[in-house]
Image (cartoon, rainbow, N blue to C red):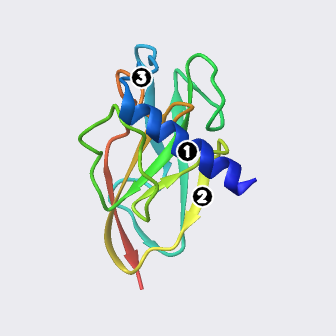
């Protein structure tokens, strides 16, 4: 199953690199936000992160329904400059392609930033992009 998913991601990335794939439209007023933690919170880890979404629904990666997408959590990084490309999967960009709306992450003690980006079935941000405000948290030792 994992090799099929990996193959799909590679195929999607290849298609995107070869041609301009139209970006999936987002409805006016769609909003992505953190239910928790709060901006400025000081937390003893691990950190439970809850995603909030208004004006759209959540669907797993690879599934196309109008006005839906899935979450990507950006940790200590900025939104990529080229939003016409699939979001990379790295330790700083975590994909929630099964449609998850909550996670628990382990972060080292110190200050961290978190931000959410909604991606379409191919992990490409919508047009206009649906992106949360970047929040800052401090993890206590």
* Residue 132 higher or lower than 22, as above or below: below
**Would you identify the image quadrant in which residue 86 lies?**
top left
Residue at the extreme left of the image, as rendered: 81
Say which of marks 2 and 1 sits in front.
1
Determine crowd level at label 1: few under 14, some 14-19, many 20+ residues with C-alpha closer than 10 A. Answer: some
Residue drawn at x 63%, y 23% as measured from the top left = 64
Residue that badge 2 annotates? 103
SS under mark 1: helix
**Label number found at residue 101:** none
Q: Which residue is mark 1?
A: 9
Q: Is residue 58 left or right of residue 131?
A: right
x, y percentage for residue 10? 52, 46
Measure the alpha-carbon separation of dots 2 and 1: 22 Å
Residue sticking out furthest to the bottom: 141
Q: Quadrant of residue 132?
A: top left
Left or right: 139 with respect to 47?
left
- Alpha carbons under labels 3 and 1: distance apart: 15 Å
Seen from the viewer's position, the closer of residues 96 and 83 is: 83
Residue 97 placement (x, y as % from top left): 61, 45
Q: Which mark is residue 21?
A: 3
Q: In the rendered structure, which disc, 3 or 2, sits on the residue that comes first in sequence?
A: 3
- Residue at 41% over, 22% down: 23
Q: Which of marks 1 and 2 precedes in the sequence?
A: 1
> What residue is drawn where x is 57% and y is 31%?
121
| Front residue of this view, candidates 43 and 58 | 58
């Amino acid at each position: 199953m994992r090799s099929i998913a990996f193959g799909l991601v590679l195929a999607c990335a290849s298609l995107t690199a070869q041609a301009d794939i139209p970006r999936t439209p987002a409805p006016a007023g769609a909003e992505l936000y953190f239910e928790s933690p709060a901006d400025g919170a000081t937390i003893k880890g691990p950190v439970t992160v809850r995603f909030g979404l208004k004006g759209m629904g959540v669907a797993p990666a690879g599934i196309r329904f109008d006005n839906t997408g899935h979450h990507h959590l950006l940790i200590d990084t900025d939104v990529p400059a080229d939003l016409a490309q699939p979001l990379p999967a790295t330790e700083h960009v975590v994909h929630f392609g099964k449609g998850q709306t909550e996670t628990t992450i382990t972060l080292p003690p110190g200050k961290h930033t978190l931000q959410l980006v909604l991606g379409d079935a191919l992990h490409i941000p919508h047009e206009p992009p649906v992106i949360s405000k970047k929040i800052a948290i401090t993890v206590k030792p």
